[in-house]
Image (cartoon, helix red, strand yellow):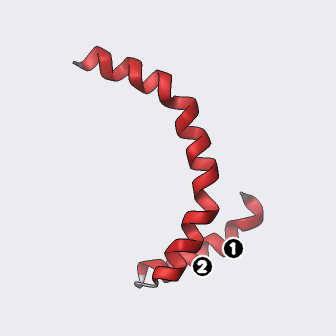
Amino acid sequence: MQAYDGELGAAVARALEGDEAAFAVAYRIVHPGLLGCLRGQRSRVTHQMRGAL
């Protein structure tokens, strides 16, 4: 993700000002890594949720 740090920061700043295209840029940068992280956490979170019910 470091290669995108500057681009991501700029996109987030513009998205916070309401720029929908900038939100799309930020989403495209973050989505693959976030999805992989969530997939890796799925079993742990599922187990925790079952314990809370």
Q: Which residue is tagged 1?
A: 6
Seen from this angle, which residue lies furthest left?
A: 53
Q: Badge 1, how many Cα within 10 Å: few under 14, some, many 20+?
A: few
Seen from this angle, which residue lies furthest top?
A: 51
Residue 51 coordinates in the image, percent (x, y): 30, 14
For the residue marked with disc 2, what is the amino acid? Ala
> Which residue sits at x=47%, y=22%?
44
> Which residue sits at x=63%, y=49%?
33
Residue 19 coordinates in the image, percent (x, y): 46, 85
Q: Quadrant of the C terminus?
A: top left
Q: Which mark is residue 25?
A: none
In the image, residue 33 above or below residue 41: below
For the residue marked with disc 1, what is the amino acid? Gly
Q: Which residue is tagged 2?
A: 10
Q: How many marks?
A: 2
Seen from this angle, which residue lies furthest right?
A: 3
Choose between 1 and 31: the one closer to the eye.
Answer: 31
In the image, residue 15 above or below residue 35: below
Residue 29 coordinates in the image, percent (x, y): 64, 63
In the image, residue 33 above or below residue 23: above
Q: Badge 2, how many Cα within 10 Å: few under 14, some, many 20+?
A: some
Choose between 30 and 3: the one closer to the eye.
Answer: 30
Q: Please tell me whether mark 2 sits on a helix, a strand or a loop.
A: helix
Position of residue 15 in the picture relative to residue 50 (left or right): right
Q: How far apart, in angstroms, are the residues tagged by discs 1 and 2?
A: 6 Å
Q: Quadrant of the N terminus?
A: bottom right
Position of residue 48 in the picture relative to residue 36 (left or right): left
Q: Please tell me whether mark 1 sits on a helix, a strand or a loop.
A: helix
Residue 32 coordinates in the image, percent (x, y): 63, 51
Asked if the residues shown at circle 1 and circle 2 are in contact, with their CB atoms under 8 angstroms apart, the answer is yes
